[in-house]
Amino acid sequence: MKKYLYYFLIIFLWACEKSTQEDKAVREPISVKTHTLKSSEEEKEETELINPIEHGSFMLKLNNRRIYVDPMGNSMIYADQKPADIVVITHYHPDYLVPGAMESLLDENTKIIVPSAVEKILPVDLKERVQVLKPDQDTTVAKINFKSISLSNEKSEKKENGFLITNSQKKILISGENQHLAEIPIIENLDIILFRMNLTTAEELEKNIEELLKLNPKQIYPYYYEGIFTYNYAAKLKRRIEERNSAIEVKILNWYKDPLH
């Protein structure tokens, strides 16, 4: 029995391991081309509001602008993507500050928005291009408002940030770390929460379900749930929230080619 438990632990740790540095392996992004697209499918991709890239990275399409959030991992992921109009970095983590991934999306007109904690560790060439938002500051680009929501982090002096992104039609909240959901103020008429599900226990999930219900958005998009166990949590979150409040839709997008990845 101990032997089987040992093998299970090894497989589990391997499955959950996430590379946080740029590597040389070519990984095809989920949202670009996983099969040969017809022209009608390409047009559909261009009109989607939220386009998963991989794990913790996605693209928002607002006001006909491409907003890439937390470019991560490997620059080859973005090789076929169109240039960013705006790049938003939500927090410091090696996954989200790989210069090759970020620079592959930039052109001379790209705006970069970061919280103050991130600005300090950017390479010099990128630091010269950023718009820094201190806690609770906001800025407007192309009639889209970006507000930094400062959240505490008891384990570090660094601050975790959520982001509220608003245009004339949508209010979109990028929630930040799941343990800080309770700190987010109630936002009236909130359309979407992008909920980063870096969960480790079922108890955390139950707590987050209550907090999401309290925030009461029209839609919830869970992401950052790689690995079989947290993938099952995403399915459970959808079922529980929609049972409790049928006015809230939980949308599970294709963030991973294979849920067992």
Image: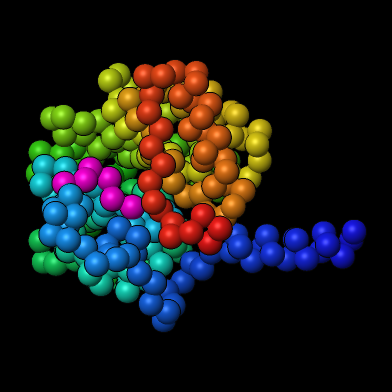
Compared with residue 38, is residue 69 higher up or lower down, i.e. above or below? Answer: above
Residue displayed at 59% across by 52% down:
228
Quadrant in which residue 171 is drawn: top left
Q: Residue 168 vs residue 21: left or right?
A: left
Magenta part of the protein: which range? Answer: 47-52
Percent coordinates x, y for residue 89 in the rendering = 33, 53
Compared with residue 233, is residue 214 higher up or lower down, i.e. above or below? Answer: above
Residue displayed at 27% across by 45% down:
50
Percent coordinates x, y for residue 77 in the rendering = 33, 69
Question: Total of numbered circles in the picture?
Answer: 0
- Is 257 or 66 nearer to us in this picture? 257
Do we see residue 186 in this rendering?
no
Q: Residue 23 vs residue 1: left or right?
A: left
- Is 229 or 68 nearer to us in this picture? 229
Quadrant in which residue 144 is drawn: top left
Residue displayed at 64% across by 66% down:
14
Percent coordinates x, y for residue 174 in the rendering = 36, 40
Compared with residue 162, is residue 182 higher up or lower down, i.e. above or below? Answer: above
